[in-house]
Amino acid sequence: MAEIPEIDLKNIPRHVAIIMDGNGRWARERNMLRVMGHKAGAESVRTVIGVARELGIRHLTLYAFSTENWNRPALEVQALMGLLKSFLLDGLNSLKENRIRLCCLGAIAEMPADVQEILARAMRETTAAAGDSPSLILNLALNYGSRGEIVAAVRILAARCLRGEITPHEITEEMVGNLLYTTGQPDPDLIIRTGGESRLSNFLLWQASYSEIYITDTRWPDFRRENLVAAIADFQSRERRFGKTGEQIRQGT
Ligand code: FPP
């Protein structure tokens, strides 16, 4: 077994976002139906939430269902919605006890009515239970597409321009950022993609501007504590420059 690297608990990424890929392949490699891969993936979700909390990650974003995922076979979509509902209903008490606040990123109003109802309840109750000191903010990206998110923000700003409230020149990055689903939250420091593909798949395109990206071949259903620790160790080995030179970063200027 590969050695688990040491990580610096004082330099834990504040916001980790994960593209949970490889469920289908995990299942196929075991001669199982794709939905069994998603079922196993839901277990990884539970594990990773616990580990994120334990390590001191403050924001965890999981890409659970994209706007493009509606194009999958109806039975697979149905199974994914079922897994989401079980995760929320069976896990609600645990989320509340552990002061984990649930947020949703995406066009939730277009989700099936029963899912919307459960999501609204879970968000309301976890927000109340976590109060002012959530141990973790758990963002589930659901019916999420980054281009759609940016277009919606652009439409709002265009309407403000038409009403004469602002001029196009007054539009700032901050104004756009405040109209995204992640408003009020820091951009992800680290984006992890499991399943080995090297693409962002319409995920947090605006927010990922300076994120460190870590890709692992590990299929999402196999992703465990040691895999998250390995991703964080890799993150900690990077020099984050935000456009500056390496010398400037080392001199703190
Ligand atoms: C991508 O794998 C994964 C998804 C589209 C869904 C992710 C869902 C879960 C992990 C389970 C349910 C979620 C929660 C929050 C309980 P893929 O099917 O595209 O894999 P492949 O590339 O190997 O086919």
Image (cartoon, helix red, strand yellow):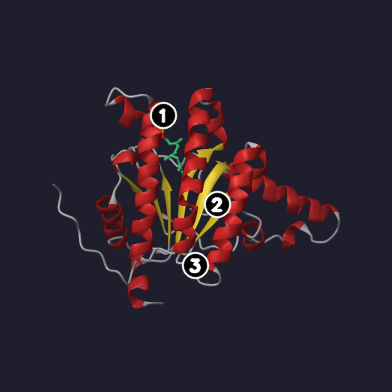
Mark in front: 2 vs 3: 3
Q: Can residue 210 be seen here?
A: no
Q: Quadrant of residue 103?
A: bottom right
Residue receiving disc 1: 35
Residue receiving disc 3: 134
Earlier-in-chain disc, 1 versus 3: 1
Say which element carries label 3: loop
Residue at the image point whose x is 34% and y is 77% from the top: 251
- Residue type for callout 3: Pro
Residue 51 in the figure: left or right of residue 96: left
Q: Residue placed farthest to the right in the image?
A: 163
Q: Nearer the viewer, residue 208 or 1?
A: 1
Near mark 1 (Cα within 10 A), the count class, few <14, some 14-19 or many ≥20, is: some
Earlier-in-chain disc, 2 versus 3: 3
Distance Cα–Cα, label 2 vs label 3: 25 Å
Mark in front: 1 vs 2: 1
Say which element carries label 1: helix
- Mark 2 within 8 Å of ligand 1, using the beta carbon: no
Residue receiving disc 2: 206
- Residue type for callout 2: Trp
